[in-house]
Image (spheres, rainbow, N blue to C red):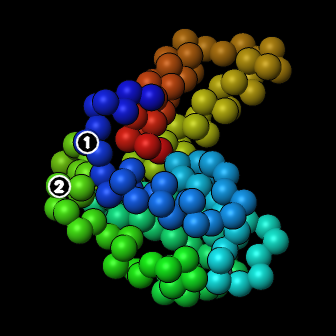
Amino acid sequence: MKRSLLVQSNFDVKIETILSRLEGVRKQGCGFAARCPAHQDRSPSLSLREGDGGRILIYCHAGCTAEAVTSSIGMTVGDLFPDDPKLRRPIPIPGVTRSRLREAAEIERGILFIVNADRHANKPVNVNDEARATLASQRIAMARRFGC
Ligand SMILES: [Zn+2]
């Protein structure tokens, strides 16, 4: 991943601190999963990922609020937002938000999956499908540069 193409964001700066206060941390898609500190959590129910503008999105699948989660690790909800405007990483494509980019990447992964499934089943893959799969790979690689 060409991280150097990106400006460092609030997410990059603060995520290590937050993760160091959580247990059961593992990588999950664009972000991380961990055991929720606000309830008796045996399986990792807390998701953390980067939102638009470099803010940190946290979500407990058991329903704990962001306030409950942050206060359990000695922080506040305000800590999830950039305090330095320079740390609001923009998506360098006008009108494209991180969530839209993530959705688009999901669709492209689906296309690639279908073409690869045909290949594995030894079904003939025509030129158009081949070209579309190549485009899908390129788009996925681009989305990955932005952390998706
Ligand atoms: Zn929880």
Q: Disc 2 beta carbon < 8 A from ligand 1? A: no
Q: Disc 1 beta carbon < 8 A from ligand 1? A: no
Measuring 54% from the left and 53% from the top, which residue is drawn there? Answer: 31
- Judge whether 69 appears above or below 58 on screen: below
- Judge whether 63 appears above or below 92 on screen: below
First reached walking from the N terminus: tag 1 or tag 2: 1
- Judge whether 121 appears above or below 99 on screen: above
Question: In what quadrant of the picture does the N terminus appear?
Answer: top left
Alpha carbon separation for disc pair 1 and 2: 9 Å
| Residue 5 visible in the shown view | yes
| Residue 65 visible in the shown view | no
**What residue is disc 1 on?**
7
Amino acid type, mark 1: Val
Viewer-proximal residue among 53 and 95: 53
Instruction: Answer whether labels 1 and 2 touch (C-beta < 8 Å).
Output: yes
Residue 65 in percent (x, y) is at 54, 86
- Judge whether 34 appears above or below 104 on screen: below
Res 5 → quadrant: top left
Callout 1: helix, strand or loop?
Answer: loop
Measuring 32% from the left and 70% from the top, which residue is drawn there? Answer: 81
Circle 2 packing at 10 Å, graded few (<14), some (14-19), many (20+), is: some
Residue 111 in percent (x, y) is at 58, 34
**What residue is disc 2 on?**
86
Measuring 27% from the left and 66% from the top, which residue is drawn there? Answer: 82
Is residue 107 rendered to the left or right of residue 50?
Answer: right
Residue 86 in percent (x, y) is at 17, 55
Measuring 38% from the left and 41% from the top, which residue is drawn there? Answer: 146
Is residue 114 rendered to the left or right of residue 87?
Answer: right
Circle 1 packing at 10 Å, graded few (<14), some (14-19), many (20+), is: some
Viewer-proximal residue among 106 and 35: 35
Amino acid type, mark 2: Lys
